[in-house]
Amino acid sequence: MKIKSIEQLKQGFIKKEFSPVEITKVFLERIEATKELNAFITVTAEQALKQARIAEQKYLAGEAFGVLEGIPITYKDNIYTKNIRTTSGSKVEEAFIPTENAPIVTRLQKEGAINLGKVNLHEYAFGITSENPFYGTVRNPWNQEYTAGGSSGGSAAAVAASLCMASIGTDTAGSIRIPAASTGTVGLKPTFGLLDNHHVRQISWTLDHIGPITNHMTDLGTMLDAMSGKQYSDAFSEDIRGVRIGVPKNYFNEQIADHMTKSYTEALHRLEKLGAVLIEIDVPFSESDLSCSMRIGITESSLVHEKTIKESLHLLGPDVKMSLENSHQLLAIDYIKALKRKEELALKFEKLFKDIDIIATPTIPDTAQKIGVRKFEINGVMDSTFHAMVRLPAVFNFTGQPALSIPCGIAPNGLPLGLQFAAAAYNERVLLKTGYAYEQAYLSSFYDERERTLASLQTVNQ
C-alpha cells in the first residue's frame, strides 16, 4: 500500500490495516538505509517506538486520539527536545541536552505525534545550503550532487525522501520555503507570532518563524491545525473563484532564471483558469529593504550568540564564524532605522492586501545549486548563492506576513521549481485553499514524477 497522506495513515490505524508500531519501524528502517542524505543528526528510535506503542494501544482500545496520533514526524535540530540533544547544527552545542521541550514539541506530542529524531541544518540556521562541516552536508534526494536548500535542509530532505510524514522547520529569511522549493515539497512560514517559537535557538527575535514542511497540501493543513490548535484545513473545501492574485511588476520579477519565469507564468495562467483574478501590482520593496532585513538579523544574532562569539568562535564553521565575528560592528542607529523601516513596510503590505488576496511570486529564482557553489549566473548576471536565494522569500520575514511554497514544475536540470504565495497577516486560510486548489488541478503529474525520481531511494510508500 502507498502511503499518500497523514489522513490515510490514520484511517489505516483506525481500520487496523496496519499499526503505528509497524509504520514507525518502516520509517526507521528507511532512515537507516538513506544515511547518505545526511538528513538526520540524531535518530530517536527508542523513544519513537515507545510513542508508537502508546498510540497503538489508543487505536486498539478505541480511545480518543490526537490530530497526529501515531504519525511519524521530525524536528529541526535547533528546536528544544527534552532529554534529546539539540545541537543547532554546531560543534559548540554538540553535547547540549535540553531539560524541557519547546512549546511546539509539547503541543505536537499531546496530539500524538511520534518523534523519529532531530534533522540536520545549516549551522545555527545561519545559511541557505545546509552544508554542515560537523554533521555532513544535507544532500538533495532528487540529485545528491545538489544541496537541499537551507537552513531547514534536513527537514525538507527527510520529507521528500519519505523519511517522515512531516518536519518542523524554522525560517528567518526563507529557511522553510527555500528547502521546500529545492526538494519539491510544501512549506509554510506562518504569520509572525502565530506559532510559539520559545525554546528554539534564535537568530533574530523579530524575523524568526517556525512552521511545517510536508509532501502535500492536505498534510500541511493537518500540521498547521495541530501546531496552532485552530482549524485551518477546512479551508480546502472553499472555492478560489474570485481570489485576487497580485502579480508584481517589480522586484519579484527581477533576476529570475528563464525556466523559472516560464513555470511561474504558466502557474499564473493555471490559477486564472481556476477562477482566480490576476492583478498587476507594484510592491513597496527594494534591495535597500532587503539590506535592512539582513542588518536586523545579523545585529540581533550578535546578542543571541554573544557568549559563543566571546568564548567559542574558533569552534564555528568558516561561514558562520565570518558572519558572527563581524556582527557587532553594526551601528545601533542603523539597527533602529531598519526596525522602523520594517514597521513601515508591514503596514504598506497590509494596505496592499486590502486590494488583493495573495501575492504570487517564484519562491527562489532557480533550482537548488550544486554543493559547494557560492556564486551562480542568472541570465548573464553573477550573484552570490545566498543573496539570490533569500531575496524573494526574505521579504515576508521582514513584513511578518504568511508565505507558502508549493511546487510548480521541473527545470531542465531535473530539479523542482517553487511557487510562493503570500497573504495578509493571519490569513493562512487563503494560502491553504489556493495552494490546495492548484495542487489538485495541476500537480498530480509532478507528484508522479517526484515518485519516479525518488524511486531509487526505495521509498517507504510501497
Image: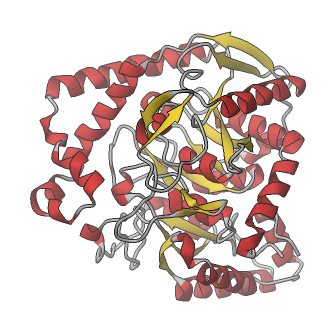
| Residue 304 x, y percent position in the rendering | 23, 50
- Which color mode does the image show? secondary structure
| Residue closest to the eye, 51 or 122 | 122
**Residue that appears at 36% across and 63% down:** 88
**Residue that appears at 24% across and 61% down:** 316
| Residue closest to the eye, 30 or 297 | 30
Q: Is residue 82 left or right of residue 359?
A: left
| Residue 296 x, y percent position in the rendering | 29, 33
Write down the quadrant of residue 33 in the picture.
bottom right
| Residue 392 x, y percent position in the rendering | 52, 31
| Residue 65 x, y percent position in the rendering | 72, 71
**Residue that appears at 56% across and 68% down:** 74
How many discs mark residues in the rendered view?
0
| Residue closest to the eye, 71 or 368 | 368
Q: Is residue 462 visible?
A: yes
Q: Is residue 264 left or right of residue 182?
A: right
Q: Is residue 167 visible?
A: no
Quadrant assignment for the N terminus: bottom right
Quadrant assignment for the C terminus: bottom right
Q: Is residue 240 left or right of residue 228?
A: right
Q: Is residue 162 left or right of residue 50?
A: right
Residue 196 lies, with reference to residue 451, above or below; the image says above
Residue 456 lies, with reference to residue 365, above or below; the image says below
- Residue sticking out furthest to the front: 380
**Residue that appears at 39% across and 54% down:** 125
